[in-house]
Amino acid sequence: MFNILRKKKNKVIFWSHIKGLEELAPIEPATKFFPDWFKNLKAFPKDAPSYFAGTVKTCPSFVDIYKRAFVIPLWCDLKITINNSNDWTWSSPSEIFQFSSHSATQYTNWLPEHEKERVKLILKPNCPWRCKTEKGYILMQQPLYYHFNEDFEVLPGFVETDIYHEINQQMIFKKTGEFFFKRGTPLCMYYVVKREELELFNVNYEHPIIKNYNKGYTKKGYSGSNIKDFLRTKFNSSYSEIRKKYFNEQ
């Protein structure tokens, strides 16, 4: 199992063997890549009723996905034409930027039939970035959450960057045709996670943690005396108050 880290310093170093790339297409915090529809969304639309609790813009869990990740943007312009998985071409501005593919026998052929139709090509960029994490910490690669990209998405997975430092993405193209992607197009998200084994256990309602948590509940709500454990004193933003209490978040 793997635990996503909260704020930790010096756990991850990104670098490129192409000098200057860090200025042209730097790896950035994911908060710089919120999808446009989310950035334009109002937390409380004008026509919302008075009891309306707010749109997803007010949901901390949505924003937290971006607060805890890095995004690697495309490091060069890319032109690609896809007829099928065996008939495709690509071009980039320089021979130092290379792309290849995963054959259908590696992945696509073994998928359920309905999913095979969705995978037109698996493009494998020769990523110019490298990553080094401290011993016991690795990268979790994820697609861009909530971007709903119609053309491609990157497959999820783990890269054990404490012992291996290349991070080549696997881009699933969903359509055939001609495509042009500008340098800076976000590819995927990376989280620094800790490698450790977690022991799962069956629910035991006599366990002290569960017993103490449950005893505060009554049919009318929460009656416990430790208010910091359950701050439902407001209709809105109670979750945010709990976070401020425990993590000193503003």
Image (spheres, rainbow, N blue to C red):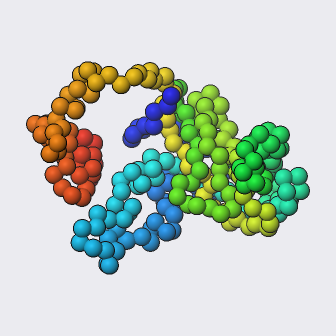
- Which residue is at 65% across, 50% downward? 154
Report the front residue among 136 and 237. Answer: 237
- In this view, the residue farthest toward the bottom is 47
- Residue 201 location (% of width, % of height): 41, 21
Work out whether 201 lies above or below 250: above
- Residue 118 location (% of width, % of height): 72, 55
Report the front residue among 3 and 235. Answer: 235
How many discs appear? 0
- Residue 148 location (% of width, % of height): 58, 61
- In this view, the residue farthest toward the left is 225
Report the front residue among 154 and 132. Answer: 154
Judge whether residue 42 can be spotted in this image.
Answer: yes
- Residue 184 location (% of width, % of height): 62, 61
Judge whether residue 124 can be spotted in this image.
Answer: no
Work out whether 158 lies above or below 89: above
Residue 69 placement, left or right of 156: left
Residue 126 placement, left or right of 218: right
Work out whether 176 lies above or below 169: below
| Quarter location, residue 216 | top left
- Which residue is at 58% across, 29% downward? 162
- Which residue is at 68% across, 66% downward? 182
- In this view, the residue farthest toward the right is 87
- Which residue is at 12% across, 40% downward? 223
